[in-house]
Amino acid sequence: MKTKTLRRWNNALHRDIGYLAFGMTIIYALSGIILNHFKAGDFQHPDYRKQYGEFRVQPPTGGVADKTYALSVLNQVNEADEYKSLVTGKGYVQIFFTNGSVYMDLATGKAQLEKKTPRYLLKEFNLLHYNNIKNWFTWFSDLYAVALILLAFTGLFILRGRNGILGRGAWLTAAGILIPAIIILIYA
Amino acid sequence: MIKKLFPLLFLAMILAVGCNQGIKENAEEATADTVLLTVATFDTTASQYVDQPVWIDGTVFHTCKHGGKRMFLVDGNDSIMVEVTTGPDIVMFDEALVGSRVHLLGLLKEQRIDEKYLNDWEAQVNAPEENHDAGIHEGSTGHEDQPKEAKLNQINSLRNQLSESGKDHLSFYSIEAISFEVIQVDDEEIVIEEE
């Protein structure tokens, strides 16, 4: 009877924490995929999708690039209306426009175009994943982490019988612990 | 009912945070005496204003892609870059700021690099999981993806600079942002105001 009451509480806790944690789980999971691939080098930037292209332009007269020259370069990629600024360096000029930039070698006229598109929503999710807000969000995300721990433990005791923690559940739980343990043993 | 609405309410909240990040216009910590520094003279004047609020104008050349916690300001060319880090009221510097001219208020910070710091940094670089916040950030394109060898070379170069300086530390200056606004520049003729 007592076990039955405990299980009822366990299942109710698992259900309600599950509802509450849904939003944050989706946020962390989606941004986790993005940051995972960013860290692996598959993405240039976690918040923006970037596309690259190459083209050639006539180097500026006297090797000095000014705004008029920058606009003529941007005109070739239909971005002249979006001009923001230009920065010069040793042998190059970088021309910025609203959604990207052109990096140009002043000696050869070889230009590299970078265009960026925001990953809407994922960008905001990444902001939370990185804990840029700090302060109160640190505690809020700690609370969410505690909720996940509770979900994990209460999840073990939802079912009785051969699919429960004393049956099939034991094998699956053991596998879920062994896999990261083996990875740690190999790489750490 | 509240529980049912929680995910939606939370989503609305984070969208609001996301939309309002970055650009702020308050300048509550500035006074009439707050000095306006320029990027061009930053290296030579910064030491006089450590831990004081300062204004600075510059073009955002680069923002850190690891969470946007720092950005670098230049003024027409890349010979001098001023590092700006996020303060308590600014959650990140969005990549969309790159190329924009900003008018920024911040606290001028000094980072002292001594032999112990370099030893700790070297240990960090050699550790399996490197901490990206360690070390000196230069702002040059691709510096965040520097291979281990390049970082060790940077550490050795700083060691040489330290021993040549005859001092027990090297000073690097940056600005911790309090607030900033994007300003419009009509043409590339940027007037640099002297102090």
Image: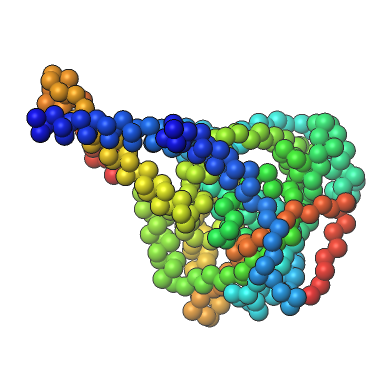
Of A180 and A1, nearer the camera is A1
Q: Position of residue B50 (x, y in %)?
A: 61, 75
For residue B139, which quarter of the picture? Answer: bottom right
The x and y percentages for residue A15 are 31, 30
Q: Residue B84, position in %: x, y?
A: 62, 60
Q: Nearer the viewer, residue B30 or B95?
A: B30
In-front residue for pair A108/A103: A103
Render colour scheme: rainbow
| Furthest-top residue in this view | A162
Q: Residue at x 62, y 62 (%)?
A: B177
Task: Specify the farthest residue to the front.
Answer: B1
Residue B159 makes an appearance in the image: yes
Q: Is residue B128 left or right of residue A81?
A: left
**Residue nearest the observer in this picture, A52 or A96:** A96
Which residue is pictured at 10% across the width and 33% down the height? A2
Q: Residue at x 47, y 73 (%)?
A: B114
User: Is B63 placed above or below B56 here?
Assistant: above
Residue B140 seen in the figure: no
- In the picture, which quadrant includes the N terminus of chain A? top left
At 33% across and 36% down in the image, what residue appears?
A17
Reply above or below: B140 against B49.
Answer: above
Q: Quadrant of the C terminus of chain A?
A: top left
* Residue B128 position (above or below residue B84): above
**Would residue A115 appear left or right of A16 to someone viewing this image?**
right
In this picture, residue A2 sits left or right of residue B105: left
